Image (cartoon, grey):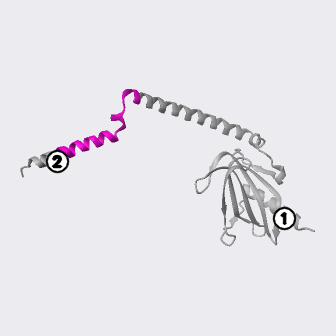
Amino acid sequence: MRSTPYCRLAAAVLAAAGAASVMHHSPAAAQTPEETKAWEAQRAQAQAEEKIKAERLAKQREARRADPMSWVRTLDPMSAGGWVFRSVGTDGSWATFSTEHQLKRSGHLVTAWLRQEYPEQQRTAAGDVYSSDVERVQYDCAKEQVRTLLAIYYAGNNLTGNQQSEQVDPKQAAWDPIVPGTQSEITFHWACGAGSAAARP
């Protein structure tokens, strides 16, 4: 079918519009040589900074593996809250503290506060960044299991900075087994032992 002048004009307009759209959405077509050079320089600088950051982190991790306590000694013991150091990861990736403040025992259940510190930022399930936290945990000393009732996350170490909290209904909080040789076993033995002492007249 022969095209009419109107059809040819419409096609030309659409083609021009499409070409303009492609040029508009193509950064390379819109950039001048100077802008391209500047963008490449910024990218190179960003890559160099990332490399330096990665090398620094690798050295810090190596130092913590060699002496995990070197990092723990930089933390505030926060003795006013009764916090006592309990354990540190063999690679220095975490440290645990506990306190007998507000420790409660009811039958074979012991409820206590634990404090966790991290040298590198962590993320909650919601995506919030934190470097330390406290947990209100409950131990079943008879069945050797634990559950978390409340967690408060802090942006900085030593329970400082912005905070976010997560609370669980005790009726819905799931119990986790105490796995031998883990961080949980260390605090389990402390809590059940401290709870027994607190229960004695």
Residue 105: name its quadrant: bottom right
Label 2: state its secondary structure. helix
Q: Which residue sits at x=80%, y=61%?
A: 191
Query: Any magenta on residue 23?
Result: yes
Q: Quadrant of residue 56?
A: top right
Nearest the viewer among 196 and 155 is 155
For the stretch drawn in magenta, the main secondary structure is helix
Q: Position of residue 74 (x, y in %)?
A: 76, 41
> How much space separates mark 1 and mark 2, taking CA atoms?
85 Å
What residue is at 13 percent from the left and 49 percent from the top? 7
Q: Residues within 10 Å of mark 2 (few under 14, many from 20)?
A: few
Which stretch appears magenta? 10-35
Which residue is identified by label 2? 10
Q: Position of residue 154 (x, y in %)?
A: 68, 51
Residue receiving disc 1: 195
Residue at figure coordinates x 12%, y 46% from the top left: 8
- State the SS at label 1: helix
Q: Residue extending furthest left? A: 2
Earlier in the chain: of badge 1 and badge 2, it is: 2
Q: Position of residue 72 (x, y in %)?
A: 76, 44
Residue 27 sits above or below residue 192 on the image = above
Q: Amino acid at mark 2?
A: Ala
Quarter of the rendering occupied by the C terminus: bottom right
The correct choice, above or below, for 26 with respect to 191 in the image is above
Mark 1, mark 2: which one is toward the viewer? Answer: 2
The answer to whether marks 1 and 2 mark residues whose Cβ atoms lie closer than 8 Å is no
Q: Which residue corresponds to the image point at 68% horizontal and 73% vertical from the top-left?
A: 171
Mark 1 surroundings within 10 Å by alpha-carbon count, few (fewer than 14), some (14 through 19), many (20 or more): many
Quarter of the image for residue 54 reads top right
The numbered dot on residue 9 is none
